[in-house]
Amino acid sequence: AEEVNAALKAAAEGNDWLGKVLNYTEEPLVSSDFQGDPASSTVDALSTSAAGDMVKVISWYDNEWGYSSRLADLAAFVAGKM
């Protein structure tokens, strides 16, 4: 689980497109803590578990706000192509 969390943390902290939409937390948070979060997904590192070669990753998101944020990103991208 530690290796998976390390990879997800590196991706969330990266400067590429994934780092702009993926967050990572080691805080003990609950679903209401993510209301209004513009990230598409926030990895809950405390909930990552592994059994053999199987890994379970829990990730939180605000369905409406995260989606709206990606629509705004898409609109800005399209506008930049015009």
Image (cartoon, grey):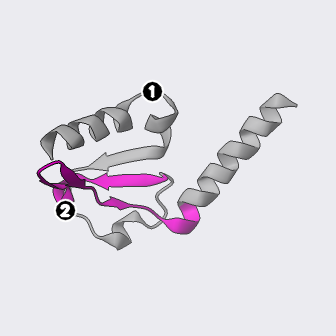
Quarter of image, res 61: bottom left
Quarter of image, res 7: top left
| Element type at mark 2 | loop
In the rendered image, the quadrant that contains the C terminus is top right
Q: Nearer the viewer, residue 79 or 55?
A: 55
Question: Horizontal and vertical percent for residue 67?
Answer: 59, 59
- Is residue 39 found left or right of 52 in the rendered image? right
At x 63% / y 58%, what residue is drawn?
68
Q: Are marks 1 and 2 in contact (CB under 8 Å)?
A: no
- Is residue 20 found left or right of 12 in the rendered image? right
Q: Which region of the structure is painted magenta?
A: 40-65
Q: Eyeballing the image, is 80 above or below 46?
A: above
Q: Circle 1 sits on which residue?
A: 15
At x 81% / y 37%, what residue is drawn?
79
Q: Nearer the viewer, residue 60 or 76?
A: 60
Q: Nearer the viewer, residue 21 or 53?
A: 53
Q: Is residue 64 magenta?
A: yes
Q: Circle 2 sits on which residue?
A: 28
**At label 2, which amino acid type do we have?**
Pro
Which of disc 2 and disc 1 is earlier in sequence?
Answer: 1
Q: Is residue 47 magenta?
A: yes
**At label 1, which amino acid type do we have?**
Asn
Using a 10 Å C-alpha cutoff, classify the residue at mark 1 as few (fewer than 14 neighbours), some (14 to 19) or many (20 or more): few
Question: Horizontal and vertical percent for residue 46?
Answer: 17, 56
Q: Eyeballing the image, is 79 above or below 27?
A: above
User: Please, which residue is most extreme toward the bottom here?
Assistant: 32
| Element type at mark 1 | loop
At x 30% / y 40%, what residue is drawn?
8
At x 35% / y 66%, what residue is drawn?
33
